[in-house]
Image (cartoon, rainbow, N blue to C red):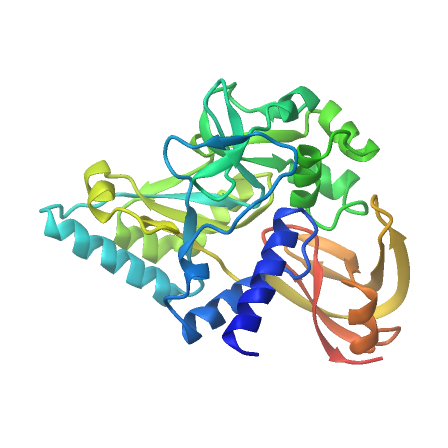
Amino acid sequence: MDIDELVASLERYNEAYRAGTPLVDDETYDQWVERLRQLDPEHPFLHAVEPEVLKARKEVRHPVPMLSTEKAYTREALEKFLSRVHKDAAEIGVTDVPFIVTPKLDGLSGRDDGVVFATRGNGEVGYEISSALDKGIVPKGGRGQGLGEIVVVQSYFDQHLATEFEHPRNMAVGIVSSDQPSDVAAKALSDGMVHFLPYSRLANWQGDGDALLADFDDITAALTAETDYPMDGMVVSVTNEVVKKHMGATAHHYRWQIAVKTKGATAVTIVEGLKWQVGRTGNVTPVLEIQPVALSGATIRRVSGHNAGWIRRNQIGIGAEIEIIRSGEVIPKLEKVLRPS
């Protein structure tokens, strides 16, 4: 696959993800982004906020750009980020740099200034979605709390919605983009389980870089336990405003912030059955019934089989040995086939 083909695929995957109908999982998308970075580090796709389109919505220009976040996938990448921060801080005479760690929510990014409620869009221009509040989205802490994300309460989703949506984000996008939410989404809204959660209200850890590195796993575990929303990692940010201003931003992300994304917990099991599920849009998707297995504190009995083509190509049937993954405490998915049926 050449660079043009790779970028075309990334653009198609991103468009589907932003529309709430992802074609690949987050980890696969991230791997393809890193492949492009290796092939062409200066490609424009890597240096702009991934676009988001909502039809029939008024465009709103953000007073300050809502940028994406640089990503780290290894401890070494986090170490390099911290070293860069300390180096840049030293240039302006700052030797003590405090950091804050917060959960990286996996929802629909937005901004609420108390009057305008808008999505991130392309970072410069978003879409006005105040109608989502009328539908029942709850602004935690009230209106005007700034930047945050539209998210579904994870425990509620797991109990009531996991068979209807592959991921909580899909439902959030559907609520915002549709004139009339589906029946199950409407029930979640009436139950007060869909929130606009400001980043300022997230559980957090604060400390210096040495403590952050030494205790990062424990910090992640503690913040995950406190957060009943879908997430896919942790965000590490500088809090010193002088250092933040000095470090600045690219067209894609702020240099003083990074998202640390880690591979989810995995387990190996055997397929015992396969059922076909009709979703809210009429799409038919396979659901694998598996030998029960413990994963991230839960007993898993069913996982998504992605799509019919995946099932056919990988010979997934009764007796197949598979590896499943649970990232960010969301619904487990088929990761790979270890032994075909």
| Residue at image location 61% in from the left, 30% down from the top | 195
Q: Is residue 316 above or below residue 78?
A: below
Q: Is residue 251 above or below residue 307?
A: above
Q: Observer-nearest residue: 203 or 135?
A: 135
Where is residue 46? Give x, y as percent: 43, 60
Residue 26 relative to residue 282: left or right: left
Q: Is residue 79 above or below residue 91?
A: below
Q: Quadrant of the N terminus?
A: bottom right
Residue 270 in sight from this viewpoint? no
Where is residue 302? Give x, y as percent: 80, 58
Q: Observer-nearest residue: 23 or 216?
A: 23
Q: Observer-nearest residue: 131 or 311?
A: 131
Q: Observer-nearest residue: 43 or 119?
A: 43
Where is residue 147? Give x, y as percent: 45, 32
Where is residue 265? Give x, y as percent: 60, 62
Q: Is residue 10 above or below residue 282?
A: below
| Residue at image location 78% in from the left, 70% down from the top | 310
Residue 284 relative to residue 208: left or right: right
Number of marks in picture:
0
Residue 322 in sight from this viewpoint? yes
| Residue at image location 85% in from the left, 62% down from the top | 289
Residue 335 relative to residue 255: left or right: right
Q: Quadrant of the C terminus?
A: bottom right
Figure quadrant of residue 184 = top right
